[in-house]
Amino acid sequence: AQSVTQPDIHITVSEGASLELRCNYSYGATPYLFWYVQSPGQGLQLLLKYFSGDTLVQGIKGFEAEFKRSQSSFNLRKPSVHWSDAAEYFCAVGPFSGGYNKLIFGAGTRLAVHP
Amino acid sequence: ETGVTQTPRHLVMGMTNKKSLKCEQHLGHNAMYWYKQSAKKPLELMFVYNFKEQTENNSVPSRFSPECPNSSHLFLHLHTLQPEDSALYLCASSQDGGDSNQPQHFGDGTRLSIL
């Protein structure tokens, strides 16, 4: 069955430190992969997506993610975290049978940033 | 301006009440989605509409009734809800629900509390 695992429920980093959020997926073929961010009281905002081609994708707000097929991973990185990056981050995979745009989301990783 | 607007932002209702959630998208998309976000659980897809036709009902109880009068509007009618239905309900849209290459854009959600 298709699934997404975000092993870290909470992560705390200091402002200016580097960040890596982990995402592992289970899927029968090369999936489409997404990272979304959710700030308190708001909906989900797309950070970046991977469909094909270059396995290192750049997103908004200085984030990047690398697709590693051999590890079934799509980890999100940022070289220097800002206090405004404190939020919850969701990894998602799609598509599924029927080709419809159905995403399966991970449980999320909540990021706290210390000054 | 997220492009996807949800009203109300907060709703408190008793188990015997009937209420409706509204979603409107200003992005010219053809697919719309309802998700349920409960604490400490992954985002759950509830319904998908593509070109006003329902293409997905993810085993959602009948006390939730969706309506999609046109590609820009989506409603979720609620009646005789249970306390476990308290959650954040998110609406999303994408260009075409039949094309998984299209990222979904989310509204800020309706926080629903069942007394």
Image (spheres, rainbow, N blue to C red):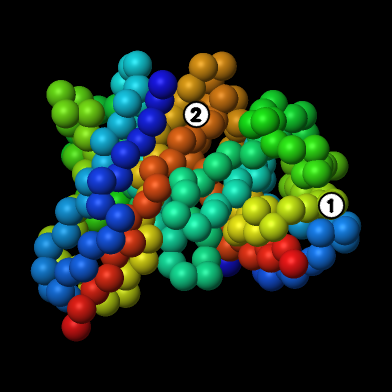
Q: Which of B80 and A93 is in front in this view?
A: B80
Q: Residue furthest bottom?
A: A115
Q: What quarter of the picture does the N terminus of chain B occupy?
A: bottom right
Q: Nearer the viewer, residue B3 or B14?
A: B14
Circle nearer the viewer, 2 or 1 = 1
Q: What element carries label 2?
A: loop
Residue at the spot 67% in from the left edge and 31% down from the top edge: B59
Measuring from the top left, give residue A83's x and y in whole percent. Answer: 26, 76
Q: Which amino acid does label 2 sit on?
A: Ser
Q: Confirm or deny contact between disc 2 and disc 1 (CB under 8 A).
A: no
Disc count in the image? 2
Q: Is residue A114 visible?
A: yes
Residue at the spot 40% in from the left edge and 47% down from the top edge: A107
Question: Few, some or many C-alpha atoms within 10 Å of disc 1 (few <14, some 14-19, many ≥20)?
Answer: some
Determine which quarter of the picture holds residue A13: bottom left
Measuring from the top left, give residue A18's x and y in whole percent. Answer: 12, 63
Q: Is residue A70 above or below residue A20?
A: above
Q: Name the residue under label 2.
A: B100
Residue at the spot 30% in from the left edge and 51% down from the top edge: A59
Determine which quarter of the picture holds residue A57: top left
Of callouts 2 and 1, the N-terminal one? 1
Q: Can residue A60 be seen in this view?
A: no
Chain at tag 2: B
Q: Mark 1 points at which residue?
A: B80
Alpha carbons under labels 2 and 1: distance apart: 34 Å
Residue at the spot 81% in from the left edge and 65% down from the top edge: B14
Q: Is residue B24 left or right of residue A78?
A: right
